[in-house]
Image (cartoon, grey):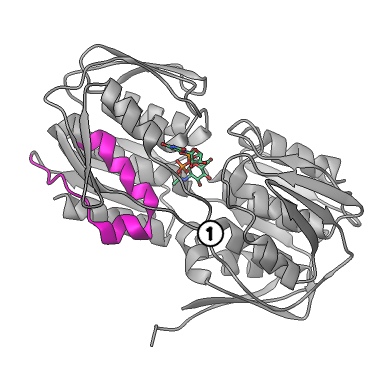
């Protein structure tokens, strides 16, 4: 059991450094499966999800070693092709081995992840895309069983620019015969990072960062060394915390061009955002002004920062409307925020927030990674001591959030007790 204890009142002041992105590192690890030999990935965050992904790869027959933020993945000639439910159940992102296993071995068996705490999260786009590339996919006993004698390039139109579907199709398309085009592809910086690793492995891909990816299949790929893109969601979380607390934080390794909309919203709220040599600095004086926010696929406002946006709105001057367009159940945490005294009203996929000067501490529970981080930030602007349980969600995505906030002057501790 992981519990974050937060005593509110401090301004966040100082320097914080952001490491590699969780949402990239997990997929880069899966991409390693595409080439026999040893690939090394640097700037991998020290988080629970990376440990789970390491276990996924081990059970497929890889040797996985990690040392000082780098992970070495030794990929054998023959891989096992089945991923276990216990791992996918703990981390849905493990389904990103589907594309590479199918491409390399002609077969992949992955459990259906089921629903989770932010919505139903289907796999229909992954499945339809892989079928377009010639795979046969059936659903048996809770597992997807995908087979293909040979994948053949095709044009795939995604009804929604799904990050996971784009990644699985990319990793399948690189070894398919002929040309694969992914239309309405996701454009997230983590997709660009994956493409750059695949290209370094010998893949032929055009259009990274645009809505159309064109992949010309090759016969084989080579192992590589690759450094993970910095985590824009961790950087954004710290930036929102700085503004909520009227702080002054230099975020080293933060990339402003990956956070255009979230940072422009902070400027609208009254913050001063400046690029620096190694990142950016964010300074806030006085109470933030209310701003409206709408989540959208990249380059829109990231759904992963939506809880931080609601937290900011909860202590802003005026009323804000926050609209969630990516995950249907992502406002569940708003009830926890209400326990901290936030004036919040959910109406479908909108939440109307009337800002208050301060929140009021209480025990609350995190149900997912980002909601958990949002509740910790809310605790920073509550009077007294807030206890956030369900901290195991937070540590899945944030390397040492408590230590990072403490270094910025906040009173935050993480206590881990073994389950009885
Ligand atoms: C990834 C990120 C997650 C982020 C999300 C959106 C990882 C590990 N997770 O999740 O942090 O919030 O992108 O930026 O990288 N959908 C379908 N059918 C599909 C696939 C998706 O309906 O086959 C729907 C989902 O239910 C959701 C929306 O599309 O409503 C977006 O999902 P997607 O972009 O695929 O997110 P993930 O890759 O799961």
**Residue at disc 1, secondary structure:** helix
Percent x, y of residue 409: 71, 69
Q: Residue at x 49, y 64 (%)?
A: 393
- Ligand 1 closer than 8 Å to label 1 CB: yes
Q: Is residue 88 left or right of residue 23?
A: left
Residue most extreme to the bottom: 420
Would you place residue 352 above or below residue 186 in this image? below
Residue 137 visible in image: yes
Magenta-drawn stretch, dominant element (helix, strand or loop): helix
Would you place residue 374 above or below residue 6 in this image? above
Q: Is residue 219 left or right of residue 374?
A: left
Residue most extreme to the left: 78
Percent x, y of residue 229: 48, 39
Q: Residue at x 50, y 60 (%)?
A: 399
Residue 248 visible in image: no
Percent x, y of residue 43: 43, 48
Q: Is residue 333 left or right of residue 79?
A: right
- Numbered range of the magenta stretch: 78-101
Percent x, y of residue 381: 78, 68
Query: Magenta span has 68?
Result: no
């Amino acid at each position: 059991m992981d519990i974050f204890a937060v005593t509110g009142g401090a301004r966040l002041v100082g320097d914080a450094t952001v490491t590699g992105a969780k949402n990239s590192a997990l997929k880069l690890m899966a991409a390693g499966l595409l080439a026999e030999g040893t690939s090394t990935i640097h700037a991998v965050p020290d988080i629970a999800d990376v440990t789970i992904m390491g276990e996924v790869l081990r059970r497929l027959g890889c040797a996985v070693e990690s040392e000082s933020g780098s992970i070495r993945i030794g990929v054998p000639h023959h891989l096992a092709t089945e991923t276990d439910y216990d791992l996918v159940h703990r981390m849905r992102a493990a389904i990103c081995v589907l594309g590479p296993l199918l491409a390399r071995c002609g077969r992949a068996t992955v459990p259906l992840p089921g629903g989770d705490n932010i919505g139903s999260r289907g796999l229909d786009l992954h499945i339809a895309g892989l079928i377009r590339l010639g795979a046969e996919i059936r659903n048996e006993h809770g597992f997807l069983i995908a087979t293909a004698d040979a994948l053949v390039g095709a044009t795939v139109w995604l009804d929604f620019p799904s990050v996971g579907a784009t990644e699985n199709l990319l990793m399948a398309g690189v070894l398919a015969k002929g040309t694969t085009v992914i239309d309405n592809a996701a454009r997230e910086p983590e997709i660009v990072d994956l493409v750059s690793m695949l290209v370094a492995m010998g893949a032929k891909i055009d259009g990274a960062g645009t809505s159309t990816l064109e992949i010309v299949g090759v016969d084989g790929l080579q192992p590589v060394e690759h450094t993970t893109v910095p985590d824009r969601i961790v950087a954004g979380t710290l930036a929102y915390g700085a503004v909520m607390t009227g702080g002054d934080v230099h975020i080293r390794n933060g990339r402003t061009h990956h956070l255009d909309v979230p940072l422009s919203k902070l400027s609208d709220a009254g913050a001063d955002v400046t690029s620096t040599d190694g990142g950016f600095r964010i300074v806030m004086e006085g109470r933030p002004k209310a701003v409206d926010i709408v989540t959208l696929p990249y380059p829109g406002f990231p759904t992963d920062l939506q809880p931080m946006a609601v937290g900011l709105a909860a202590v802003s001057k005026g009323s804000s409307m926050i609209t969630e367009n990516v995950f249907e159940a992502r406002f569940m945490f708003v009830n926890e925020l209400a326990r901290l005294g936030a004036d919040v009203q959910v109406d479908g996929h909108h939440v109307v927030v009337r800002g208050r000067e301060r929140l009021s501490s209480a025990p609350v529970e995190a149900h997912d990674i980002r909601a958990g981080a949002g509740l910790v930030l809310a605790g920073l602007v509550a009077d007294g001591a807030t206890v956030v349980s369900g901290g195991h969600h937070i540590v899945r995505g944030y390397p040492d959030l408590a230590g990072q906030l403490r270094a910025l002057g906040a009173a935050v501790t993480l206590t881990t007790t073994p389950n009885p």
